[in-house]
Amino acid sequence: MPTLIHRRVDAARRGENPFVLARLRSGWAVIGEKQVARGYCLLYPDPVVPHLNALQGEAREDFLRDMARLGDAVLRVTGAVRINYEMLGNLEPALHAHVFPRFEAEAEALRTKPIFSSAWDEPWAKAPAYDAQRDRELIQALVRELVHA
């Protein structure tokens, strides 16, 4: 059964995924649909696989390298103090990596918590949706870092 990740990758291949930042060696760098933290992104593998351990050799190395490359871009563009990486696959059993910038100004109650924990429920609920106009400069900067760096 195709997951949301499968559908998003199919849309990216057709040029119909509005969240795509860049095609990387291992897959697609996309901006998060909800910007719970400015610059939140994801990496989808192409082709989609069920989990990281399904990738072998160079394909696995490419995905992990691209994940770090996306994290480097988010770090440089947002001025975050660090990047958290999460690959869960519990709700969507298809490999995808969350690249989540962490900021000094985060509330103390959130600062040490993973992004998919009950501590983050309220911020996720209140987070603004990605907006192409509002986030234009962020997107342009991320694309420059990913494509032209």
Image (cartoon, helix red, strand yellow):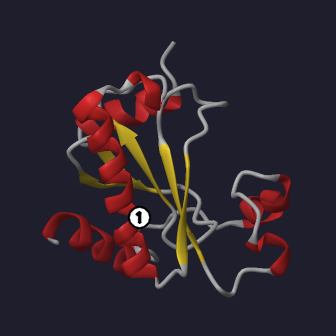
Residue 16 appearing in the image = no
Q: Position of residue 15 (x, y in %)?
A: 24, 42
Q: Secondary structure at mark 1?
A: helix
- Residue receiving disc 1: 71
Q: Report the residue at 31% width, 52% height from top.
A: 66
* Residue 9 quadrant: top left
Q: How many marks?
A: 1
Q: Position of residue 71 (x, y in %)?
A: 41, 64
Q: Report the residue at 36% width, 75% height from top.
A: 136
Q: Position of residue 104 (x, y in %)?
A: 65, 86
Residue furthest toward the left?
A: 148
Q: Nearer the viewer, residue 72 or 58?
A: 58
* Residue 44 quadrant: top left
The answer to whether 27 appears left or right of 79 in the picture is left
Q: Nearer the viewer, residue 83 or 128?
A: 83
Q: Nearer the viewer, residue 41 or 88?
A: 88
Residue 122 appearing in the image = yes
Residue furthest toward the front?
A: 57
**With respect to residue 6, does 12 lie above or below?**
below
The answer to whether 30 appears left or right of 88 in the picture is left
- Amino acid type at image mark 1: Gly
Q: Report the residue at 58% width, 65% height from top.
A: 35
**With respect to residue 35, does 79 lie above or below?**
below
Structural crowding at the residue carrying mark 1, measured as other residues with C-alpha within 10 Å and reported as few (<14), some (14–19) or many (≥20): many
The answer to whether 61 appears left or right of 101 in the picture is left
Quadrant containing the C terminus is bottom left
The answer to whether 65 appears left or right of 122 in the picture is left
* Residue 92 quadrant: top right
